[in-house]
Amino acid sequence: MGRAAPLDRNRELTVTRALTLPDPAAAAARSISELTSSWPETPPGADPLPGQLDRWLASRGAELVAVRRHIHAHPELSGHEFETAALVARELTRAGLSPRMLPKGNGVMCDIGYGDRVIALRADLDALPLPDTKDVPYRSTVDNVCHACGHDVHTTVLLGVGLALAQLAERDELPGRVRLLFQPAEETMPSGAPEVIAAGGLKDVAAIFALHCAPQLPVGLVGVRSGPFTAAADKIEVRLTGRGGHTARPHLTADLVHALGRILVDVPSLLDRKLDARAGVSMVWGAVRAGEAANAIPIEGVARGTIRVLSRDAWRDVPELVTKLVHDVIAPTGADVEVNYTRGVPPVVNDRLATAVVAGAAGAALGSDRIVEAEISMGGEDFAFYLDGVPGSMIRLGVGVPGSETKFDIHQSAFDVDERSIGYGVRVMVHTALAALSAGAF
């Protein structure tokens, strides 16, 4: 990779402030110190990292937590992750590495070590357009923008992995080349993964790995699964037009409200029966609008929803099938119909060998009893675009607070994590990179 693009003075000041603990500094320092003091150098039943990296990780825990809290307090929306990317680039440069900014300046790529085969690790940088409703020192300082999906943790973990691997590379103890991909715009469409790929993110890559925060799993656990992991996520808009009129005489109209009702009920039901039940298809409407007056049939109406699919083969056929079903259902009503079908992300289908590698690495990192089977999610994840080109696997990182009565989910304004998960995530991904470099099958 080439060297990082130079940072201007204002950005340097911003990034320097990144490692300053949020106010009130003394209280935050105490909480971080108390938190990281419980990080074991090597968890019971785990294998030690090479090169005294366990001791190094324990000593850097407070700094990594401070980085996460800064990113959480200063979130950036999809496509605007400039300061977050600058923070990452500066810290990697300070470690003696040569990060390269993506063309727009809101993402980072960085190679560590040498070799023809590359193992890639990916994290996403962007936040969500949600208010932060937590009462914590690191609460978001940006109105209606919040890291409610854990991307601040993903970024911090991958940064920690890069700093750790840099230690091995300095001593010529890294058995190959690892590429860090800090990706923008995971939460929007079009998403950032194709931008990373277009910038050379997958050049020479043999396999790619990623993790995602899982509040349903207690901290210290990791969920793995081979095969379908997340669903394709598409959007559909159905727009109807037709003759309106008085509700006393619906026979003189196209009765668009009735027509919309048929679409809402009949199309998902028929879709289920046109596809193999094992395809894992879910069609759900999220918005419907038609008319205002109780006694007037409107002249237009619209319904919007999502279609989620676990099977890549079924995903390929769904747009044409759904469009035909809508037209077939509407035909008897006399309404005119326009269907706008928008492709989203493909399904994430974890490679069998890559999943075996990351499962073994996670077991070595945390102990075999800390590895559980991950549930399939119907959510979308643009990590799928990387898997179109190379084998790989995504895992779930437990971030839930053990014994807590509050059950968080991602995309909630109050979402937060047990920050001990950062140390566990770094250990897992370092072990994964080293194991994948040693796996001759990639």
Image (cartoon, grey):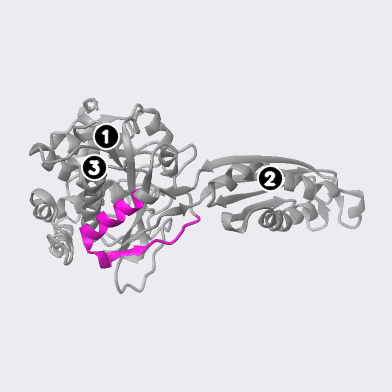
129 to the left or right of 318:
left
Neighbour tally class for label 1: few under 14, some 14-19, many 20 plus, Cα within 10 Å = some
The range drawn in magenta is 354-378
Q: Nearer the viewer, residue 36 or 174?
A: 174
Residue 81 numbered tag: none
For the N terminus, give its image quadrant. Answer: top left
Q: State how far apart marks 1 and 3 are (Cα).
A: 8 Å
337 to the left or right of 92:
right
In primary-sequence order, the first of circles 2 and 1 is: 1
How far across and how far down the image is residue 291, in percent? 75, 51
Q: State how far apart marks 2 and 3 are (Cα).
A: 43 Å
Q: Is 268 located above or below residue 189 in the figure?
A: below
Q: Nearer the viewer, residue 403 or 351?
A: 351
Residue type, label 2 = Leu
Residue at coordinates 42% horizontally, 36% vertically from top-left?
389
In primary-sequence order, the first of circles 1 and 3 is: 1
Residue type, label 3 = Leu
Q: Secondary structure at mark 2?
A: helix
- Which residue does the numbered mark 1 point to in the structure image? 117
Could one spot residue 22 in this view of the protein? Answer: no
Q: Secondary structure at mark 1?
A: loop
Is residue 370 rendered magenta in the image? Answer: yes
In primary-sequence order, the first of circles 2 and 3 is: 2
Nearer the observer: mark 2 or 3; the answer is: 3
- Which residue does the numbered mark 2 point to in the structure image? 321
- Which residue does the numbered mark 3 point to in the structure image? 437
